Image (spheres, helix red, strand yellow):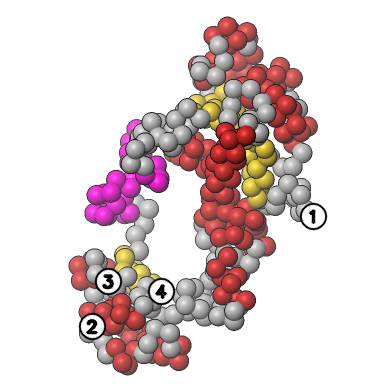
Amino acid sequence: MGPLAGLKVIEFAGIGPGPMAAMQLADMGATVLRIERREGIELGVPRPLKYDLLLRGRQSVALDLKDPEAVCLVVELVAQADVLIEGFRPGVMERLGLGPDICLARNPRLVYGRMTGWGQDGPLAHAAGHDINYIALTGVLGAIGRAGQAPTAPLALAGDFGGGAMFLVMGVLAALLHARATGQGQVVDAAIVDGAASLATVFYGLSAAGRWKAERGTNILDTGAPHYDCYECSDGQWISIGPIEARFHAELARLLGLDAEALGAPGDEACWPQARAAFAGAFKTRSRDGWCALLEGTDVCFAPVLSFEEAPMHPHLKARGTFVQVEGVTQPAPAPRFSATPAALPTAPAAPSGARALQGWITADRISNWQHLLQEKETQA
C-alpha cells in the first residue's frame, strides 16, 4: 500500500535524518532494507527498540561492512535496489567499497542518497557536528529566541528533520523521476546546512528588504509581536495566538473584551508593549480549557499549547487520525495522505532478522549462498 509500493530502498544505519527519511519512504509504501552495524555501536538516545519509532516499517540485517563478504552481499542487494541512503562522513562508503562509482556501475539506475550535516565538500565536510551546529551556521539558530535571551534550539526540527530528512526525501524522489525517464541514476548530496538555509529563504528575503531585524524576539514571527506569541493562563498552562491579519486581530480583541483601538493595529510596533500587557492580563483570567471553550474554532488564530502526551487526545487530531497506535505505542501516522494510494498502518521497529529480511530482494538460492554469513553475524549481533 502507498504511492511508493514496489520501490526498493537500502538504508545504511545511522541516526536522525537518515532513519527519518527511510521511515518516510517506508510509510509511503517503499520496501526498505536497513543494513545495521554489527559492532554494537549505540546509535542515538538509548531506549527499548519498540520506542525507536524512526525504525518502524522495515526489516533489517546486521552485517560487518569491514568483512569483504558482507560488502559483496550488499553490492548484490544494490543491484536490486532503486534507492540507497547513507549518512556516513564523506569518504567512508568509498573506503568500504560501496561508494557511488561501484554501486552505480552495478546498477546504473540507482539513486544514491547521501545525508550529511556539512555536505560532501567544503572546509567542514569531514568535521563532526550535530543539528544545533548546522542550523547555527546557516543563521537559523541565531534568529530563534526571545529578546535579550540566548538562541533557542528548536528541538531537531529545523536541522536534522526539516533541513535534512525532508530534503533528502525530496531529492531522492526527484532523482527517481529522472532515472525512470532516462535510465540514469545519480548521487543526491543532501546537506543539512543546505536544507536549513533553504527553509529560511523567506527570512533572508525579509532581511535583505530591511523588514527583519537581526535582534531576536523583535520581529513579527519570532515572539516580538504580542499577537504572535504564547501566553500563560490562570492554571499555569499556555495558549498560542497568531492573528496577524487586522480582521482576525479585531475579532480577538472583541472576544477578549479589549478595546481594539487601544491595542493598536497589528503592524504598529509602537503599540506592541501595551498590547502585550493587555493580552497577558486577559489570558491570566481563565484556565487553558476556559480559553479553548471560548476561542477554539474561531478566526482568532488560536490553539492550546499541548504536550506530547496531550496532543494525540485533542479532538481535531483524533478526528483526523493524526496519531496511531502500533503495538501499544502512540505515534504520528504516515503523512501526507493520498486519495488513491493510502498508506498502510506502520509496522513496529524490528530487530535484525537475517535471511528473512532478504526475501524479495534476492532468490532463495542466493540467500542460501549467504546463509553462513547471515547466521554468523546475526548470532553475534
The tag earlier along the polypeptide, 3 or 2, is: 2
- Pair 4/1: label in front: 1
Amino acid carrying label 2: it is Arg
Mark 1 Cα shell of 10 Å, populated few (<14), some (14-19), many (≥20): few
Task: State the CA–CA distance, disc 4 to disc 2.
Answer: 18 Å
**Quadrant where the C terminus is found in the figure:** top right
Task: State the CA–CA distance, disc 1 to disc 3.
Answer: 49 Å
Amino acid carrying label 4: it is Asp
Q: Which residue is mark 2?
A: 254
Residue 377 is situated, as x and y percent measured from the top left of the image, at: 62, 18
Residue positioned 51% across, 16% down in the render: 359
Number of the label disc, if any, that sits on residue 123: 1
Q: Which residue is mark 3?
A: 299
* Element marked by disc 1: loop
Q: Which residue is mark 4?
A: 229
Q: Are marks 1 and 3 in contact (CB under 8 Å)?
A: no
Task: State the CA–CA distance, disc 3 to disc 2.
Answer: 12 Å
**Nearer-the-camera pick, 331 or 84:** 84
* Element marked by disc 2: helix
Amino acid carrying label 1: it is Pro
Residue 96 is situated, as x and y percent measured from the top left of the image, at: 75, 29
Mark 2 Cα shell of 10 Å, populated few (<14), some (14-19), many (≥20): few
**Nearer-the-camera pick, 215 or 83:** 83
From which residue to which does the magenta span run? Answer: 310-337
Residue 251 is situated, as x and y percent measured from the top left of the image, at: 26, 79
Q: Is residue 18 visible?
A: no
- Pair 3/2: label in front: 3
